[in-house]
Image: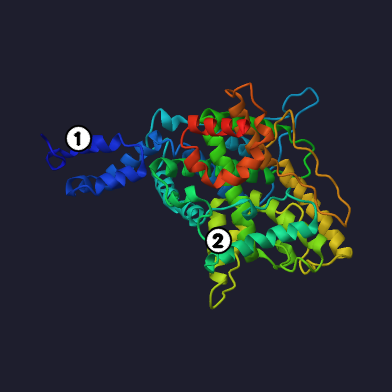
Amino acid sequence: MAVLTDLPTELLEEIYLNLNSIDDVHYFARVCKSTYKVIQRTKIYTEIMRSVIRQSSALRYDVQLCRLLRMHSDIVEHGQPIQVTTIGPNGQLSSDLNSWERSLGLAIADRSYLIHCCAETLPDEDVYEILARWQGLRVLQTLWLTRQLKEQDYLAVSDTVDADDFIYAYDLINDRDEDFHDGDSAARSSPEAEFYTRFDADQKGRFHAAVTSLWLLNEIRWILTNFTYRANTFAVPLTILDKCKERLDEQTETPLLDHLDRYAVHSFLYHHLLPLHSPTLSDQCSSKLPLTFPSELEKEPVYCIRLLQVFLVAGQTYLQPPDIIDLAVRDKLRRKPPYMVTRLPASTELYIRSTNAEPFRPGLDLTSSGRVGSELGSLSLVNLTLFQRATIAQTSLHPAPQINTTSLDSLFTDDDLLSTWLEERALMCFDMYMRRDRQDIRQVFEKRWRKTKWMVWWWAASEDKARMKMERWRRA
């Protein structure tokens, strides 16, 4: 019987080329010297990883993400708002799509690397970038597994319109995290979660796919914010958005599971980690708005909370998963001696927000409730409108609704459209095969989901298990 050490190099290479996981390649390389020697050759190693990327379910969004990130860098270098192609009175385009609009559509639509996986369709630099991303995003897995989150550990902009309630919910997130790190609360709060301390290979793949697919959607949203703000029409970008979402839907493998995973990751990144580590960006110059807010929220509760609301919405638009990791690291450093001031470098700020359609004046008091507060409120509404116009949760036939103007003494009533859209996509997948003799899942989903979304990787171990769990929610 042949053993690995007896196999020729050519056959070992074929074994590598049939693996569909980056980790499997590295595990196989550690088996013996013969398998390790194969991947020591850079050209062979790159070809193996190119094959893995083509076959891996976990990496199915990474190539498109590489393209959008290149487009992101090009927009930063361009440094100007993107012009919107207009539509004439007869409903036809007034001109051909510009290069930015074409690039956005092709970045998602072109999947030629699946047919001819070579250096032309998947360059070496993209392969290395995907390898680095696979490793780097594991930080989020570590953060997820650090402690079990409960419904009090999340804060969304749309949770409440009462300033005192908003401050309480915001402070509670930070207080609960401090209690855990001080040893005053346990890492797990339910008996079944005691065993949920690590991800298996399948869960790691699901997690990576959920993060990268959400990142991909957020990059599209970021690009849409860079189109000219006061354009007469936004129909062409929305039509491109429709096509992008259609293409991404075609890459869905387990519909209910994929949408639940993405919804859970979105809540973790932008309803937990973002508000938890937001103090890192607080109390900066007013010119940094909307990516800052005053830390003294009680000084002028309504005005200060409104800036925090805008910050949380801006964070969903401008801050991608690596930026959230960076925020968490900086927040950790500033809480320990010598209590470093960990502001973002200018290059990072430029990359996050390359154009500023409606800038805030520097030197303004963020806690003012007078004329300055009115100015900040007006510009905040402009920014919220910009974010709303770029939301993924819209179509060319049903654009996002206008932001409602509020009085100066009340909070913004901004709906978290992306969160609602992600939830609705999951419920629509469930509706397709649900039992008809039970109550509507929408009547019980929100209550049940709040308590169980941290554990989704375990109770939703497969499409069928997720569906059975949700059917039991309807029956209870």
Residue 99: % across, % down: 61, 37
Q: Nearer the viewer, residue 326 or 138?
A: 138
Outermost residue toward the bottom in this view: 338
Q: Nearer the viewer, residue 157 or 122?
A: 157
The residue depicted at 57 percent of the width and 44 percent of the height is 453
The residue depicted at 71 percent of the width and 44 percent of the height is 416
Mark 1 sits on what residue?
Answer: 11
Q: Is residue 130 above or below residue 277?
A: above
Assess disc 2: are there few (<14), some (14-19) or many (≥20) residues with their C-alpha within 10 Å of its C-alpha: some
Assess disc 1: are there few (<14), some (14-19) or many (≥20) residues with their C-alpha within 10 Å of its C-alpha: few
Which kind of residue does numbered mark 1 sit on? Leu
Q: Is residue 72 above or below residue 336?
A: above
Element assignment for label 1 = helix
Quadrant of the drawing holding the C terminus: top right
Element assignment for label 2 = helix
Tell me the tag on residue 328: 2
